[in-house]
Image (cartoon, helix red, strand yellow):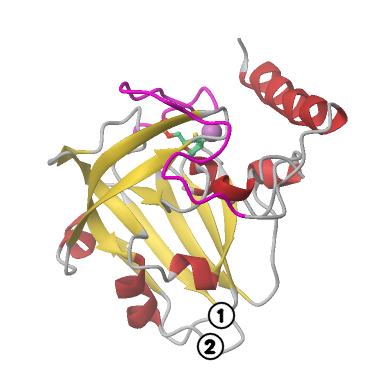
Amino acid sequence: MSKERYIAAKQAWAEKQVAKGVRPREVRAEDRLPPGQKLTTGFPVLDLGIQPDVPLAEWTITIDGEVEQPVTLDWTAFNALPRVEDVSDFHCVTTWSKYDCRWGGVAFTELYERVKPHADAQFVYFTGYDGYSTNVPLAQCLDDDVMIATHFEGEPVSREHGGPARVIIPKLYAWKGTKFVKGVHFLTADKLGFWEIRGYSNGADPWKEERYA
Ligand SMILES: Nc1nc2c(c(=O)[nH]1)N[C@H]1C(S)=C(S)[C@@H](COP(=O)(O)O)O[C@H]1N2
Ligand SMILES: [Mo]
Protein backbone atom coordinates (compact mmCIF):
# COMPACT_ATOMS: atom_id res chain seq x y z
CA MET A 1 0.00 0.00 0.00
CA SER A 2 1.36 3.43 -0.85
CA LYS A 3 2.14 5.87 1.90
CA GLU A 4 -0.68 8.18 0.76
CA ARG A 5 -3.27 5.39 0.77
CA TYR A 6 -2.13 4.21 4.20
CA ILE A 7 -2.46 7.71 5.64
CA ALA A 8 -5.86 8.25 3.99
CA ALA A 9 -7.09 4.91 5.34
CA LYS A 10 -5.97 5.71 8.88
CA GLN A 11 -7.59 9.13 8.68
CA ALA A 12 -10.85 7.63 7.35
CA TRP A 13 -10.78 5.10 10.19
CA ALA A 14 -10.62 7.91 12.74
CA GLU A 15 -13.54 9.71 11.07
CA LYS A 16 -15.61 6.50 11.01
CA GLN A 17 -15.04 5.90 14.72
CA VAL A 18 -16.27 9.40 15.52
CA ALA A 19 -19.32 8.90 13.24
CA LYS A 20 -20.07 5.61 15.08
CA GLY A 21 -20.17 7.54 18.32
CA VAL A 22 -16.82 6.57 19.81
CA ARG A 23 -16.28 9.33 22.32
CA PRO A 24 -13.81 10.00 25.10
CA ARG A 25 -14.87 9.07 28.65
CA GLU A 26 -15.61 11.67 31.27
CA VAL A 27 -13.92 9.66 33.98
CA ARG A 28 -10.45 8.22 33.69
CA ALA A 29 -10.31 4.42 34.09
CA GLU A 30 -7.92 3.14 36.73
CA ASP A 31 -7.04 -0.33 35.46
CA ARG A 32 -3.53 -1.00 34.27
CA LEU A 33 -4.96 -2.00 30.87
CA PRO A 34 -6.76 1.05 29.48
CA PRO A 35 -10.38 0.57 28.27
CA GLY A 36 -10.77 -0.94 24.83
CA GLN A 37 -7.19 -2.25 24.70
CA LYS A 38 -5.96 -5.84 24.25
CA LEU A 39 -2.67 -7.14 25.54
CA THR A 40 -0.12 -8.31 23.02
CA THR A 41 3.14 -10.05 23.69
CA GLY A 42 4.60 -9.21 20.30
CA PHE A 43 5.67 -5.77 19.24
CA PRO A 44 3.79 -4.56 16.14
CA VAL A 45 5.41 -1.93 13.93
CA LEU A 46 3.54 1.22 12.94
CA ASP A 47 5.02 3.80 10.64
CA LEU A 48 4.26 5.82 7.52
CA GLY A 49 5.78 3.21 5.26
CA ILE A 50 9.16 4.85 5.64
CA GLN A 51 11.85 3.65 7.99
CA PRO A 52 14.54 6.24 7.36
CA ASP A 53 18.10 4.99 7.37
CA VAL A 54 20.00 7.50 9.48
CA PRO A 55 23.66 6.48 9.88
CA LEU A 56 24.89 7.32 13.37
CA ALA A 57 27.66 9.46 11.86
CA GLU A 58 24.99 11.69 10.29
CA TRP A 59 22.44 11.61 13.08
CA THR A 60 21.73 14.78 15.04
CA ILE A 61 18.98 15.95 17.37
CA THR A 62 18.08 19.63 17.59
CA ILE A 63 16.36 21.06 20.65
CA ASP A 64 15.25 24.62 20.06
CA GLY A 65 12.33 27.05 19.91
CA GLU A 66 11.43 29.17 22.94
CA VAL A 67 14.60 28.35 24.86
CA GLU A 68 17.63 30.21 26.16
CA GLN A 69 20.18 27.71 24.88
CA PRO A 70 19.15 25.88 21.71
CA VAL A 71 21.41 22.96 20.92
CA THR A 72 22.13 20.44 18.19
CA LEU A 73 23.79 17.28 19.45
CA ASP A 74 25.45 14.59 17.38
CA TRP A 75 25.24 10.93 18.35
CA THR A 76 28.37 11.03 20.51
CA ALA A 77 27.33 14.15 22.40
CA PHE A 78 23.78 12.87 22.90
CA ASN A 79 25.00 9.57 24.29
CA ALA A 80 27.38 11.34 26.65
CA LEU A 81 24.37 12.83 28.50
CA PRO A 82 23.30 11.20 31.77
CA ARG A 83 21.18 8.15 31.02
CA VAL A 84 18.07 6.61 32.53
CA GLU A 85 16.33 3.27 32.29
CA ASP A 86 12.61 2.80 32.88
CA VAL A 87 10.05 0.04 32.48
CA SER A 88 6.69 1.20 31.14
CA ASP A 89 3.60 0.03 29.29
CA PHE A 90 2.93 0.92 25.66
CA HIS A 91 -0.57 1.64 24.34
CA CYS A 92 -1.35 2.03 20.64
CA VAL A 93 -4.60 3.67 19.61
CA THR A 94 -5.29 0.74 17.26
CA THR A 95 -6.11 -1.13 20.53
CA TRP A 96 -2.97 -3.13 21.33
CA SER A 97 -1.00 -2.66 24.51
CA LYS A 98 2.35 -4.10 25.51
CA TYR A 99 3.40 -4.32 29.15
CA ASP A 100 6.82 -3.93 30.73
CA CYS A 101 8.87 -2.35 27.96
CA ARG A 102 12.36 -1.60 29.25
CA TRP A 103 13.61 1.57 27.61
CA GLY A 104 16.97 3.24 28.06
CA GLY A 105 17.95 6.68 26.95
CA VAL A 106 18.02 10.32 27.96
CA ALA A 107 15.27 11.70 30.19
CA PHE A 108 13.24 14.53 28.69
CA THR A 109 13.91 16.53 31.87
CA GLU A 110 17.64 16.27 31.16
CA LEU A 111 17.17 18.02 27.79
CA TYR A 112 14.76 20.48 29.36
CA GLU A 113 17.29 21.59 31.95
CA ARG A 114 19.99 21.88 29.34
CA VAL A 115 18.17 24.22 26.92
CA LYS A 116 16.41 26.30 29.60
CA PRO A 117 12.98 26.94 28.05
CA HIS A 118 11.39 30.36 28.55
CA ALA A 119 8.54 30.50 31.04
CA ASP A 120 5.97 30.92 28.25
CA ALA A 121 7.04 27.73 26.43
CA GLN A 122 4.11 25.44 27.21
CA PHE A 123 4.08 22.99 24.30
CA VAL A 124 6.53 20.64 22.66
CA TYR A 125 6.51 19.74 18.97
CA PHE A 126 8.54 16.67 18.00
CA THR A 127 9.69 15.91 14.46
CA GLY A 128 11.06 12.73 12.92
CA TYR A 129 13.41 11.89 10.06
CA ASP A 130 10.45 10.38 8.17
CA GLY A 131 8.49 13.66 8.14
CA TYR A 132 6.34 12.65 11.12
CA SER A 133 5.46 15.11 13.86
CA THR A 134 3.47 15.19 17.05
CA ASN A 135 2.66 17.69 19.78
CA VAL A 136 2.46 17.31 23.55
CA PRO A 137 1.89 19.80 26.37
CA LEU A 138 5.18 20.50 28.12
CA ALA A 139 3.77 19.52 31.52
CA GLN A 140 3.22 15.96 30.27
CA CYS A 141 6.73 15.76 28.84
CA LEU A 142 8.14 16.49 32.28
CA ASP A 143 6.90 13.19 33.74
CA ASP A 144 9.86 11.17 34.97
CA ASP A 145 9.03 8.30 32.58
CA VAL A 146 9.34 10.40 29.41
CA MET A 147 12.56 9.89 27.50
CA ILE A 148 14.34 9.87 24.19
CA ALA A 149 15.09 6.18 24.01
CA THR A 150 18.12 4.72 22.28
CA HIS A 151 17.72 1.26 23.84
CA PHE A 152 14.95 -1.31 24.16
CA GLU A 153 15.46 -4.35 26.40
CA GLY A 154 19.15 -3.53 26.59
CA GLU A 155 19.69 -3.44 22.81
CA PRO A 156 19.85 -0.41 20.51
CA VAL A 157 16.34 0.49 19.30
CA SER A 158 15.94 -1.24 15.93
CA ARG A 159 15.28 0.78 12.82
CA GLU A 160 11.70 -0.53 12.50
CA HIS A 161 10.95 0.57 16.06
CA GLY A 162 12.32 4.06 15.52
CA GLY A 163 16.08 3.90 15.91
CA PRO A 164 18.51 5.48 16.32
CA ALA A 165 16.32 7.29 18.88
CA ARG A 166 12.61 7.59 19.59
CA VAL A 167 10.40 9.43 22.03
CA ILE A 168 8.60 7.43 24.74
CA ILE A 169 5.64 8.99 26.58
CA PRO A 170 4.09 6.02 28.40
CA LYS A 171 0.99 7.78 29.74
CA LEU A 172 -0.24 8.80 26.26
CA TYR A 173 -1.19 6.73 23.21
CA ALA A 174 1.98 5.74 21.43
CA TRP A 175 1.44 7.93 18.37
CA LYS A 176 2.49 10.86 20.61
CA GLY A 177 5.98 9.35 20.73
CA THR A 178 7.93 10.23 17.59
CA LYS A 179 10.14 7.48 16.20
CA PHE A 180 13.35 8.41 14.31
CA VAL A 181 13.31 11.64 16.32
CA LYS A 182 15.17 14.58 14.85
CA GLY A 183 13.81 17.70 16.53
CA VAL A 184 12.32 18.82 19.84
CA HIS A 185 10.84 22.28 19.55
CA PHE A 186 9.51 24.30 22.49
CA LEU A 187 6.51 26.46 21.55
CA THR A 188 4.35 29.06 23.26
CA ALA A 189 1.26 28.02 21.28
CA ASP A 190 0.13 24.49 20.49
CA LYS A 191 0.73 23.24 16.94
CA LEU A 192 -0.99 20.04 15.80
CA GLY A 193 1.16 17.14 14.62
CA PHE A 194 0.80 14.66 11.77
CA TRP A 195 -2.10 12.59 13.14
CA GLU A 196 -3.60 15.37 15.22
CA ILE A 197 -4.25 17.28 11.97
CA ARG A 198 -5.87 14.12 10.58
CA GLY A 199 -8.52 13.62 13.23
CA TYR A 200 -6.63 12.00 16.12
CA SER A 201 -7.28 13.35 19.60
CA ASN A 202 -4.98 16.08 20.81
CA GLY A 203 -5.25 14.79 24.39
CA ALA A 204 -4.48 11.10 23.68
CA ASP A 205 -5.11 9.86 27.24
CA PRO A 206 -5.62 6.07 26.92
CA TRP A 207 -7.55 5.84 30.22
CA LYS A 208 -10.09 8.34 28.90
CA GLU A 209 -10.13 6.74 25.46
CA GLU A 210 -9.13 9.99 23.84
CA ARG A 211 -8.60 8.29 20.50
CA TYR A 212 -10.16 10.59 17.92
CA ALA A 213 -11.11 14.24 18.01
N1 LIG B 1 8.40 9.05 13.15
C1 LIG B 1 7.31 8.31 13.41
N2 LIG B 1 6.98 8.10 14.69
C2 LIG B 1 5.89 7.36 14.99
C3 LIG B 1 5.05 6.84 13.98
C4 LIG B 1 5.42 7.11 12.63
O1 LIG B 1 4.74 6.70 11.67
N3 LIG B 1 6.56 7.85 12.39
N4 LIG B 1 3.94 6.10 14.32
C5 LIG B 1 3.41 6.28 15.69
C6 LIG B 1 2.42 5.28 16.05
S1 LIG B 1 0.88 5.46 15.39
C7 LIG B 1 2.69 4.31 17.00
S2 LIG B 1 1.50 3.26 17.59
C8 LIG B 1 4.07 4.08 17.47
C9 LIG B 1 4.47 2.68 17.07
O2 LIG B 1 5.73 2.32 17.51
P1 LIG B 1 6.28 0.89 17.10
O3 LIG B 1 6.33 0.82 15.59
O4 LIG B 1 7.63 0.75 17.72
O5 LIG B 1 5.30 -0.12 17.62
O6 LIG B 1 5.00 5.01 16.93
C10 LIG B 1 4.50 6.31 16.73
N5 LIG B 1 5.60 7.15 16.30
MO1 LIG C 1 -0.51 3.97 16.64
Residue matched to label 2: 118
Relative to residue 23, is residue 206 drawn left or right?
A: left
Lower position in the chain sequence, tag 1 or tag 2: 1
- Residue 150 lies in the magenta-colored region: no
Circle 1: element type: loop
66 or 138: nearer the eye? 138
12 or 98: nearer the eye? 98
Number of numbered discs present?
A: 2
Q: Residue at x 56, y 41 (%)?
A: 131
Q: Quadrant of residue 39?
A: top left
Figure quadrant of the C terminus: top right
- Residue 33 lies in the magenta-colored region: yes
Residue matched to label 1: 66
Q: Residue at x 29, y 73 (%)?
A: 110
Q: Residue 112 placed where, x, y %?
A: 39, 76
Figure quadrant of the N terminus: top right
Relative to residue 91, is residue 212 drawn left or right?
A: right
- How crowded pointer 2 is (Cα within 10 Å; few <14, some 14-19, many 20+) is rated as some
Q: Residue 79 placed where, x, y %?
A: 18, 59
Say which amino acid is labelled 1.
Glu
| Magenta segment | 28-56
Q: Residue 10 placed where, x, y %?
A: 68, 25
- How crowded pointer 1 is (Cα within 10 Å; few <14, some 14-19, many 20+) is rated as many
Say which amino acid is labelled 2.
His
In the depicted structure, whether residue 189 falls above or below residue 30: below
In the depicted structure, whether residue 150 falls above or below residue 76: above
Asked if one can make out residue 56 in the rendered structure from this viewpoint, the answer is no
Labels 1 & 2 near each other (Cβ < 8 A): yes
Q: Residue furthest right?
A: 19
Q: Residue furthest top?
A: 1
Q: Residue at x 12, y 41 (%)?
A: 154
